Image: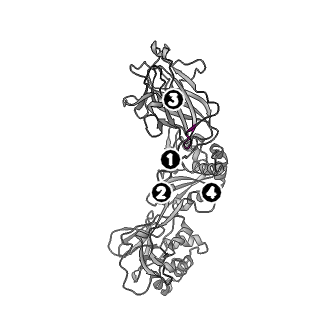
């Protein structure tokens, strides 16, 4: 179908403001005024609005306000614009868009209303005494209407005695010079989709093309929960954001990129670049607009919008300054002071009880698997674990887990084991193997140096309650959740120290790194009662080694 859009609003908005969400208003097709003159015609005919009329022509809004769609314009008079800087095209576009709304809003009644302008800024339209005013939501006073409710064939015109200042939100703040790397990356996800089923055909031009009163939906995956960091363009969402300058971005990129070295068979360099950029931005935003006012103590922790916990975070805010935004605050950072463990190489915890990411086939794993709940045991994460048992005296039961989002770095790898009943029955002998799995060929490529499975022994014959281990590694009972590891409590068995991944496997559609845990107890050990071929697994943990 041939389509021609009868408005250039989309081009104007993208040119000066990046990406704004489409606003679906009940008054989108409000009843038009009885005048035969358009809004642009009314504005052009009024001498006191000559400056604003020229700004409309500069930005392309003259064509929009001469069309069929319904708008309300709060036009600042020439006196109001006498001191305005009209030499900067971006500032002019911001000013103009801050005084036009896409519906009919008459000056009537006494209740304060929130009016969404075409730049998606929510302004307050209200009455005070005998007059009406328009103001920024955070301001206490507004711009007075010196003339109101002037009807046009496509909307209403109000005349203001002063302009309404434009305050950038966080999304718009990064569009300023000096923030090009982060702006270019985040804005690259902007998408604008024409919604034909929500648009109205109003004409057919001379070439046979349909002319639409058009509705567009704007989107950006970095706004949404799956991969996003927050609705940074929404005025009703309040955030604090650490925003790196170009120099801060470049320094951090050089520091972080080696962690995302890729062996992608098609384009490893592109994969490394994209994963590095995402790692840099994913924990820069917080659901707190008061971070600028807080003096953190060592016991304080803040959480990014993606859930990263950062303890004693004063170091994040030592090199830069706070700036105001209409939907929160921006910390302009001259350096990103995150550590690897706080941002790009965070601990990885795989909960054994989650079926997603757990591979278990009774036939090949030679065992049975069942879930167990013990909500009273404070040592357990989530209060749940799995029990993997052998199906025969000569079988070695096993279970396999996906390990998502590993980077090219070192980890200590633990298997958190739960004692049985009675609580002193904890003896297990575990073999583990880590490999890269190819979905297409189902081939296991063992991580170099781990082709032969390693094993660890967990026992309980220490008189002091500590776990005994094989002499090869006397430290395999290291704990993570506090306190010394005990024979009668859940224990972190150290499977590997300083395990090195040479390449990152980050943001994969199908997780390729897997770990297989095997209960490897010889039949004669089971027969004499020394051990049992049973594993009670709470979780697998990969702790970064910086």
Residue neighbourhood size for the residue with mark 2, other residues' Cα within 10 Å, grouped as few (<14), some (14–19), many (≥20): many
In 3D space, how far apart are the residues under numbered discs 2 and 4 (Cα atoms)?
19 Å
Q: Which residue is mark 2?
A: 231
Measuring from the top left, give residue 299's x and y in whole percent.
Answer: 50, 37
Between 245 and 138, the one nearer to me in the picture: 245
At mark 3, the secondary structure is strand
Q: Which residue is mark 3?
A: 517
User: Which residue corresponds to the image point at 41% horizontal and 35% vertical from the top-left?
Assistant: 382
In 3D space, how far apart are the residues under numbered discs 3 and 4 (Cα atoms)?
43 Å
Residue 79 in view, yes or no: no
Earlier along the polypeptide chain: callout 2 or callout 4?
Answer: 4
In 3D space, how far apart are the residues under numbered discs 1 and 2 (Cα atoms)?
13 Å
At mark 2, the secondary structure is loop
As drawn, 67 above or below 397 = below
Quarter of the image where one finds residue 186? bottom right
Q: Which residue is mark 1?
A: 304
Q: Which residue is mark 4?
A: 181
Disc 1 vs disc 2: Cβ atoms closer than 8 Å?
A: no
Earlier along the polypeptide chain: callout 3 or callout 4?
Answer: 4
Magenta residue span: 436-443
Q: Which of the image's four quarters has the C terminus?
A: top right
Measuring from the top left, give residue 10's x and y in whole percent.
Answer: 51, 71
């Amino acid at each position: 179908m041939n389509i021609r859009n009868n408005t250039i609003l989309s081009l104007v908005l993208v040119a000066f403001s990046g990406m704004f969400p489409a606003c679906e208003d009940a008054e989108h097709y409000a009843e038009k005024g009885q005048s035969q003159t358009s809004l642009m015609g009314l504005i052009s005919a009024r001498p006191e609005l000559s400056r604003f009329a020229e700004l409309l022509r500069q930005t392309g809004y003259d064509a929009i306000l001469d069309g069929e769609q319904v708008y309300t314009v709060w036009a600042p008079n020439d006196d109001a614009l006498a001191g305005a800087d009209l030499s900067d095209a971006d500032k002019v576009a911001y000013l103009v868009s801050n005084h036009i709304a896409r519906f009919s809003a008459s000056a009537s009644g006494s209740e304060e209303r929130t009016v969404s302008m075409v730049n998606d800024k929510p302004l307050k339209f209200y009455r005070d005494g005998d007059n009406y005013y328009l103001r920024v939501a955070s301001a206490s006073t507004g711009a007075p209407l010196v003339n109101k409710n002037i009807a046009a064939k496509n909307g209403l015109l109000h005349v203001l005695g002063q302009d309404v200042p434009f305050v950038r939100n966080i999304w718009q703040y990064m569009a300023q010079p000096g923030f090009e790397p982060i702006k270019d990356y985040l804005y690259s996800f902007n998408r604008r989709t024409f919604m034909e089923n929500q648009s109205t055909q109003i004409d057919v031009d001379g070439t046979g093309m349909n002319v639409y009163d058009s509705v567009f939906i704007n989107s950006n995956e970095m706004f949404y929960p799956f991969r996003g960091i927050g609705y940074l363009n929404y005025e009703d969402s309040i955030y604090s954001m650490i925003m790196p300058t170009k120099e801060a971005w470049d320094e951090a990129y050089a520091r972080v990129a080696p962690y995302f070295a890729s062996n992608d068979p098609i384009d490893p360099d592109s994969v490394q670049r994209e994963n590095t950029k995402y790692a840099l931005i994913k924990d820069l935003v917080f659901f707190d607009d008061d971070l600028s006012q807080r003096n953190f103590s060592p016991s304080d922790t803040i959480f990014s919008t993606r859930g990263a916990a950062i303890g004693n975070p004063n170091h994040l805010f030592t090199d830069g300054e706070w700036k105001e935004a209409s939907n929160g605050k921006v910390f302009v950072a001259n350096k990103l002071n995150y550590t690897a463990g706080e941002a790009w190489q965070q601990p990885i915890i795989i909960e054994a009880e989650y079926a997603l990411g757990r591979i278990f086939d009774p036939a090949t794993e030679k065992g049975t698997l069942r879930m167990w709940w013990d909500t009273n045991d404070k040592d357990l994460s989530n209060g749940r674990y799995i029990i993997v048992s052998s199906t025969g005296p000569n079988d070695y039961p096993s279970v396999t887990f996906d390990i998502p989002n590993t980077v090219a770095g070192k980890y200590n790898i633990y298997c958190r084991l739960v004692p049985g009943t009675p609580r002193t029955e904890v003896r297990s002998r575990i073999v583990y193997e880590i490999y890269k799995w190819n979905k297409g060929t189902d081939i296991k490529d063992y991580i170099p140096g781990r082709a032969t499975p390693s094993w660890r022994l967990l026992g309980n014959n220490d008189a002091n309650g500590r776990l005994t281990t094989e002499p090869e590694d006397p430290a395999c009972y290291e704990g993570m959740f506090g306190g010394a590891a005990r024979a009668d409590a859940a224990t972190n068995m150290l499977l590997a120290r300083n395990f090195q991944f040479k390449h990152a496997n980050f943001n994969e559609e199908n997780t390729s790194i897997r770990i297989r845990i095997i209960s490897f107890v010889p039949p004669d050990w089971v027969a004499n009662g020394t051990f049992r071929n049973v594993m009670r697994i709470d979780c697998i943990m990969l702790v970064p080694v910086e």
